[in-house]
Image: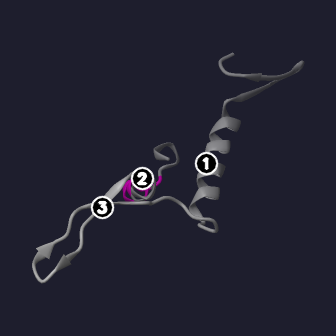
């Protein structure tokens, strides 16, 4: 994502959605036990297709056209 000059704040927000996070609930200055949030992208979220497009765009950049066909990787 950094290659596409996406702001660091947006990159960090995407990372937060897929990494394990823990939370606690506070009631009247008493904190509950920490519990793990089941985070991740859900069906219909707009971010996963964008991330897929970025990955495909990066893959397409590495493809070199040669007269006999396609060459992937270094020349």
Query: Are there few (<14), some (14-19), or many (20+) residues within 10 Å of tag 3?
Result: few
- Badge 1, how many Cα within 10 Å: few under 14, some, many 20+? some
9 magenta-colored: yes
Q: Is residue 13 left or right of residue 61?
A: left
Label 2 vs label 1, nearer the camera: 2
Give the quadrant of the C terminus.
top right
From the viewer's perspective, is residue 30 above or below residue 74? below
Which element is circle 2 on? helix
Query: Label 2, on which residue?
Result: 15
Residue 62, quarter of picture: top right
Farthest residue toward the left? 29
Q: How is the image coloured?
A: one colour
Q: What residue is shown with label 1? A: 54
- Viewer-proximal residue among 30 and 13: 30
The magenta stretch spans residue 26: no
**At 52% across and 48% down in the image, what residue appears?**
4
- What x and y, as percent, mark residue 54? 61, 48
Query: For residue 23, which quarter of the picture?
Result: bottom left
The segment highlighted magenta reads 6-12
Instruction: Tell us which disc is closer to us: 1 or 3.
Output: 3
Label 1: which secondary element: helix
- The image position of residue 22, as x and y in percent, is 30, 59
State which tag comes first along the sequence, 1 or 3.
Answer: 3
Q: Which x, y percent locates residue 10?
A: 42, 59
26 displayed left or right of 21: left
Do the residues under discs 1 and 3 have CB atoms within 8 angstroms? no
Q: Residue 44: where, in percent of width, then height?
A: 64, 68
Q: Which residue is mark 3?
A: 35
């Amino acid at each position: 994502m950094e290659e596409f000059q996406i702001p660091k704040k947006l990159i960090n927000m995407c990372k937060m959605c897929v990494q394990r996070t823990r939370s606690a609930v506070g009631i009247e200055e008493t904190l509950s036990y920490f519990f793990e949030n089941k985070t991740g992208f859900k069906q219909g979220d707009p971010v996963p297709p964008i991330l897929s497009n970025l990955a495909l765009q990066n893959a397409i950049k590495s493809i070199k056209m040669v007269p006999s066909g396609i060459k992937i990787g270094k020349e």
